[in-house]
Image (cartoon, rainbow, N blue to C red):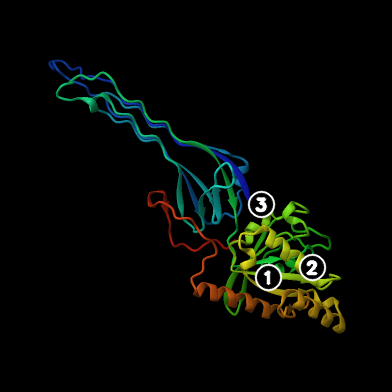
Amino acid sequence: MKFLDEAKVYIRSGDGGAGSVSFRREKFIEFGGPDGGDGGRGGDVWIEAVNGLNTLIDFRYQQHFKAQIGTHGMGKNRTGANGADVTLKVPVGTQVLEEDQETLICDLTEEGQRFRLAAGGNGGWGNAHFKTSVNQAPDWANPGLPGEEKTIWLHLKLIADAGLVGLPNAGKSTFLAAVTRARPKIANYPFTTLHPNLGVATIDGQEFILADIPGLIEGAHEGIGIGDRFLGHVERTRVLLHLVSAQEEKVGKAYTTVKNELEAYGNELTDKAEIVALAQIDVLDEATLKKKMKELAKACGKTPFQISAATGKGMTEVLRALRDVIVEANARGKKPAKAPKLRHRDMIATDEDRTDDDA
């Protein structure tokens, strides 16, 4: 299945049905009076976060969504039927933005959360609605109100507990494959990973979701390489695992390069808890390993972990460190994302667990 994390969609809610102008005409009834019914209300356009989806690929093939219009009113005081609603089903973690791609409409961070994107137009009043003691035969009715239409952008930011960052070929995909059942592409050339991958890691009987994104290079915030467009998928994480390959000639510079790109991207990524690990240590001798550990510790200001996905060395310790940060964040009640306050009539939220499908 192709991964798609951005889509442009046109939506339109239904117009309200027009009111009816009608008079009662029956034998032996001399003054039947007005009996025009009201028009039905137009359908709404809703968006809902559902389980089982982890991409916006469905919106590659359908970009226009229109709710049904309300039925017009009819004689004999018959009210028109309301138009059917339309619901856009999206993965958990989807943000909805206005056409300018800056104004946030809603952020769906929980399964079952719903938001009304466009309200249907009200139905028009029939002439029976205007009957009064001084105007007993009104011959007019209201037209239905038009629905709303707009173009919106859907941006998917995956829900994960921990995120992997680092330069290309830092061993992120290898780490993900070693600790989860995910099977990302692994090869000995840069930018093997072209889209984010998710996996569920288990340590001491506890599970957490791990996200792997394409590698960053110097100037990624300016669009160099793959750029930083996939960093949004680690915005919601509690902790970042920064992997630095032991094969880098200058591991300190490799760390600062990625750190600078995270700072340039913003969105509080540099404020997240960070665990640093020197990966692929199985290719180094003891003296070189000691030298690079010292250089990396100086760059990051802490003692990095030493890991090797090939031999399994240090993997358990890193997983436990990630788990401890996640558990502590959960205990403090810290959520992976800040959702805007939504109006009660526009939002319905449930307490269902979020999806943990592998990407």
**Category of crowding for the residue at label 3, using alpha-carbon neighbours closer than 10 angstroms: few (below 14), some (14–19), many (at least 20):** some
Residue 142 in which image quadrant: top left
* Residue beneath disc 2: 254
Task: Tell me what residue is drawn at x 72 percent, y 61 percent.
Answer: 261
Mark 2 or mark 1: which is in front? 2
Q: CA distance from mark 3 to mark 1?
A: 23 Å
Compared to residue 310, the image places residue 352 above or below, namely: above
Q: Considering the numbered disc 1 on the image, is that residue within a helix, a strand or a loop?
A: strand
Mark 3 or mark 1: which is in front? 1
Q: Earlier in the sequence, mark 3 or mark 1?
A: 3
Which percent across, then down, holds residue 182? 67, 64
Is residue 68 visible in the rendered structure shown here?
Answer: no
* Disc marking residue 3: 3
Q: CA distance from mark 2 to mark 1?
A: 14 Å
Query: Label 2 is placed on what type of residue?
Result: Ala
Of residues 11 and 268, the one drawn nearer to the viewer in this rendering: 268
Is residue 337 visible in the rendered structure shown here?
Answer: yes
Query: Label 1 is placed on what type of residue?
Result: Leu
**Category of crowding for the residue at label 1, using alpha-carbon neighbours closer than 10 angstroms: few (below 14), some (14–19), many (at least 20):** many
Q: Considering the numbered disc 2 on the image, is that residue within a helix, a strand or a loop?
A: helix
Q: Is residue 48 left or right of residue 38?
A: right
* Residue beneath disc 1: 241
Q: Is residue 85 left or right of residue 72?
A: right
Q: Earlier in the sequence, mark 2 or mark 3?
A: 3
